[in-house]
Image: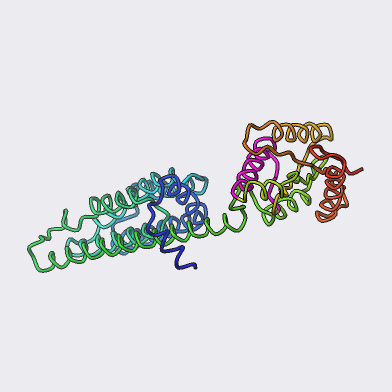
Amino acid sequence: MLKTLEAQLLKQATPPALKAEFAQYDFERLHRFCVLIYVASICIWLLFNLIVSFPGKQGFTLYSMAFLAALSINAVVLAFIRQARHFQWLNLVFVLLIGIGIRLMIEGLPLELRPDWLLLGASSILYSASVLPLRRWSFFATIALTWVILDPFVMTGISVLELRGTMLLVYALFLTALTLYSFIKLRQAKLHTYIMSKLLLEQAYNDTLTGIPNRRSFMARANERLHARPREPDHYLAMIDVDNFKKVNDLYGHDSGDEVLKRVAADIREVMAGFDYARLGGEEFAIYLAGVRRDDVQALADRLCRVIREAATPHPVTVSIGLARVGDSDSLNQALVKADRALYHSKHSGKDRYTFDE
């Protein structure tokens, strides 16, 4: 079953909105890792700068301190960034700074050593970028920027026509292709995993017929509200049952019954926006109302009954509602029992009404 779902998923084009959602999720999950990569890159650059400066007798110049400060500021800014789209541009600034820093550092080496060190610097940048949560355009820009700055054939005295130059070119092309392929495949795998996880979670916590949360989701959210501290003033639990629903199924068929459930769910979503609601199963729904007064609950229940009763539909229905205040010492199951008891009174005293459990 999982392979079938995965095969169907791979055939579908991913909407841009979902890609943007994944990019934000991926960045949030790897935010600390990104900061670690930046800090490690700065440390490695500083180490080689010191090696070139002192044993190489070049001296640690003001340029070195300026680049160190700029790179450090970049890393600090990253620590406070929370949007993936901002990171894409910040990373290009970081690549530009560290690329120029590497280039200037390597200029202090003998001419014959520069091509190899430039290639090593470029490979380090590309490998680091390939594991970062970048968008495709940002990674392509990183590749272009890296080779423009760290071109091993510029100011090195080596020609592509030489044997050594040809070998460097072939290795550079191989390195670019390898990192590009790795980045695309890794990003594709993470995107598909994210979509599959999102799909499975939606199926696990949403009711497939009505599109609103299901019992599992409601119990988790309601328990979270119930145990929240500090607790909001008053909590109420509502149990809702569609009146005479069996007759709708028997007279008009299950398709018509499904349409009735969808419409009732849509009305609950509209009237109870801001609260936790769900379809518990069959024609039964529940709502957890946190931080409300009794008068507000009464007004909402009255409005919901009216909206469902007055809806222009081929198969009009009404609902009965049971309401219970959730006491400070009540468990969720105890509150459900009280609301169900109130629902029983609504069903057996005329329907199309709400009743409080006193």
Question: Is 176 left or right of 248, judged from the image as shown?
Answer: left
Q: Is residue 354 above or below residue 157?
A: above
Q: Position of residue 341 (x, y in %)?
A: 87, 49
* Residue nearest the observer in this picture, 312 or 192: 312
Question: Is 281 left or right of 332, judged from the image as shown?
Answer: left
The residue furthest left is 161
Q: Residue at x 32, y 59 (%)?
A: 126
* Residue nearest the observer in this picture, 354 or 181: 354
- Quadrant where the image shows the C terminus: top right
Asked whether 342 falls inside the magenta stretch, the response is no
Specify start and end residues of the magenta stretch as a single range.
Answer: 255-280
Q: Position of residue 317 (x, y in %)?
A: 70, 39
Q: Position of residue 10 (x, y in %)?
A: 39, 60
Q: Residue at x 51, y 52 (%)?
A: 28
**Disc count in the image?**
0
Q: Position of residue 20 (x, y in %)?
A: 44, 46
Q: Residue at x 45, y 68 (%)?
A: 3
Question: Is 75 left or right of 253, judged from the image as shown?
Answer: left
Label the magenta part by its dominant secondary structure. Answer: helix
The image's colouring method is rainbow
The residue furthest front is 251
